[in-house]
Image: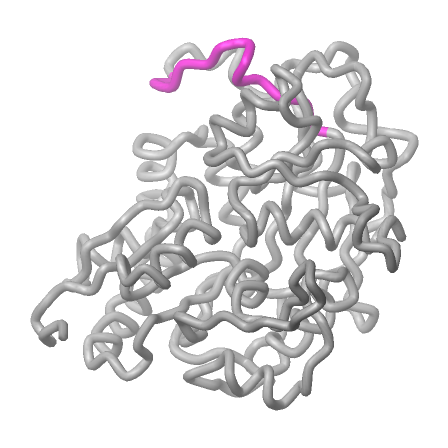
Amino acid sequence: MALVTDPLRVGFVPEHFSTPLYFAQTYYHLNARLIPFPSGTGAMIQALRAREIDVGIGLTEGWIAGLGSKRAPNGVISREGGYSLIGTYVTTPLCWAISTGANRDDIRNVEGLRGKKMGISRIGSGSHVMGFVLADQHQWLTPNPTTPPFTAHPLGDFQALRNAVNNRTADFFMWEHFTSKRYFAPSKTPSSQSTSPSMSTTSHSPSSAAHTTSLHTLNSPFSQATSPLATNTSSPFAHTPTDLIRKVGEIYTPWPSWHIVARHPTDARLEGFFAALDRGITHFETHQEEAVQYISTQLDYSMEDARTWLGTVQFARGTQGVAPNVVEHTVAVLRQAGVLVDAKDREEISRMIAFQKDSGAMQMR
């Protein structure tokens, strides 16, 4: 049994979204051992169930898919636990870039992805779950589970996924836009990556009444596809032809993108964790140039991208607690996409959430 004085073992994804967590530990005495999980939420789920970490900060869809009711190949409905939802980290949706290899001329747009090989980090990860959301949006799902819209290939981290779409182990994968952007190959034509005849140019808010996901290629802070890689000679990160990718589309999560889970919600150390994390978020919001410097020097992002990203993200004001309506909506979308099966709503939701907060405070902005 851990002592109150022992540091929490906190799993996180070492990307730009982790900046407030860094500030919490640097300035506000967060008593935690921060453990990076480059391959994302799916890996943290395994670590939580193996008792290797106490807390995880990861993607909403990954956490909820891991807790929801699923049907095994033999038809048996199963539920796995190992953690509970305890907090909200980012209230804005996440933009996933849909990418293929830089020279994959056989894949030109999202419509051409049906039946292809989808690279994912791990089974149950956000990169896996969002594939089903994409398929549901395009009406590619069928009642027959033996004919999936694409085959999923677990490959590990972002580097492995980039390599896979270039060596044809996979045809496409999805990863957060700004993390992907530094690896976009220069366009062969001025508009080859920024527009596509198959892509919608109409923006639909993820918080709309229809709660639909949407694809965007124009009029979006995410639509600039050409990377500064070719000219940014000061970058400390090396890139090779097998690193470079080409973006064929985008999809947004129709829910707040990041949540916090814990293996033991009654852990007395969580009170100090939330207090320090809230102060780290306030520091992030009031010291944005410091955030840009940290992101552009310690993480794999340019200063320009860091500043652009700041205008697209909103962290929670008070991280403790999860709004039930957010979980209900996410479960509903994941059921529609075939990730989860039907179950009694109240029973499902109450089992997932350890700390609830007012749903009215969680409207996406």
285 on left or right of 72? left
* Image coords of residue 158 (percent x, y): 49, 32
Q: Which residue is most to the right?
A: 197
Q: Is residue 172 left or right of residue 68?
A: right
The residues colored magenta run: 235-247
Residue 126 position in % (x across, y down): 57, 51
Q: Is residue 151 above or below residue 65?
A: above
Say whether residue 262 is magenta.
no
**Which quadrant of the figure contains the N terminus?**
bottom left
Res 183 → quadrant: top right
Figure quadrant of the C terminus: bottom right
Give me the residue at 25% from left, 70% from top.
273
**The quarter of the displayed image where residue 327 is located:** bottom right
Residue at the spot x=79%, y=38% of the render? 218
Which is more toward the observer, 326 or 140? 140
Looking at the image, is 167 positioned above or below residue 340? Answer: above
Determine the residue positioned at 74% across, 54% down.
133
Work out whether 21 lies above or below 242.
below
Residue 208, horizontal then vertical, whole percent: 78, 68
